[in-house]
Image: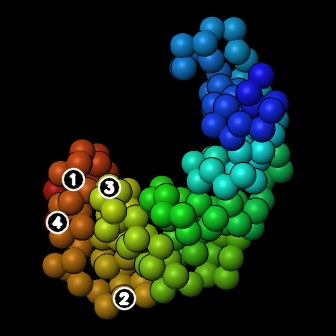
Amino acid sequence: MAADRGDRNAQFSLGNLTHSGGAKYGSEGVEIDHSQAIRWFRKAAEQGLACAQFNHGTMYYGGAGTKQDYAEAVRWYRRAAEQGLDKAQVNLGKCYGAGEGVKQSYSKAEKWVRKAAEQGNADGQFHLAGIYQEGRGVQQDDAEVVRWLSLAFEQGHAVAAAAAARL
């Protein structure tokens, strides 16, 4: 099998299959097995596949198939975020904002969330609006709140729509 021969994309696919179960991917008979999922994600992540690094970090963040470990999650999020993966940038920023696995830093939270928001990531846009609303690491700015919420809302981000309606 390609995954056993080191094909990182096949390893990533097996990680997804065993993480969510095969039915989601049209493969009946594959059972959810988080310990196998994290094993396959790690193999692909170690070969530099950003989406596998993100998923591997998410497994550590939530403690699926392994002991929950925010610092390990941050390590993998960072690797994917540095490659430009927007959802990893959002999660890394959220970890900095909450001080999960890293020393809390609002300026680093803003930096990473902004990178995702500027790529058009709706979740990043929503979180960047929150950063401006609370003035965490930036000057509080209602115009920026509205700007970023509107961009997230235009993409169908449901929570952003509710937040925009409250404004």
The residue to which callout 2 is attached is 138
Residue 81 sits in which quadrant? bottom right
Say which quadrant the N terminus sits in: top right
Q: Say if mark 3 contacts mark 4, CB within 8 Å.
A: no
Residue 75 relative to residue 90: left or right: right
Residue 131 rendering spot, x and y as whole percentages: 37, 76
Q: Secondary structure at mark 1?
A: helix
Q: Say if mark 2 contacts mark 3, CB within 8 Å.
A: no
Residue nearest the viewer, comparing 13 with 16: 13
Bin the neighbour count of mark 3 within 10 Å (Cα to Cα): few under 14, some 14-19, many 20 and up.
Answer: many
Residue at 69%, 40% in the rendered image: 8
Q: Residue furthest top?
A: 28
Measured Cα–Cα span from mark 2 to mark 3: 20 Å
The residue to which callout 3 is attached is 122
Measured Cα–Cα span from mark 1 to mark 4: 13 Å
Nearest-to-viewer mark from 3 and 1:
3
Residue type at tag 1: Phe
Residue at 80%, 32% in the rendered image: 5
The residue to which callout 4 is attached is 167
Bin the neighbour count of mark 4 within 10 Å (Cα to Cα): few under 14, some 14-19, many 20 and up.
Answer: few
Residue 97 relative to residue 119: left or right: right
Measured Cα–Cα span from mark 3 to mark 1: 8 Å
Residue type at tag 2: Val
Q: Secondary structure at mark 2?
A: loop
Chain-order first, disc 2 or disc 1: 2
The residue to which callout 1 is attached is 153
> In this picture, is 40 found above or below 134?
above
Measured Cα–Cα span from mark 4 to mark 2: 20 Å
Nearest-to-viewer mark from 4 and 2:
2
Chain-order first, disc 4 or disc 2: 2
Residue type at tag 3: Ala
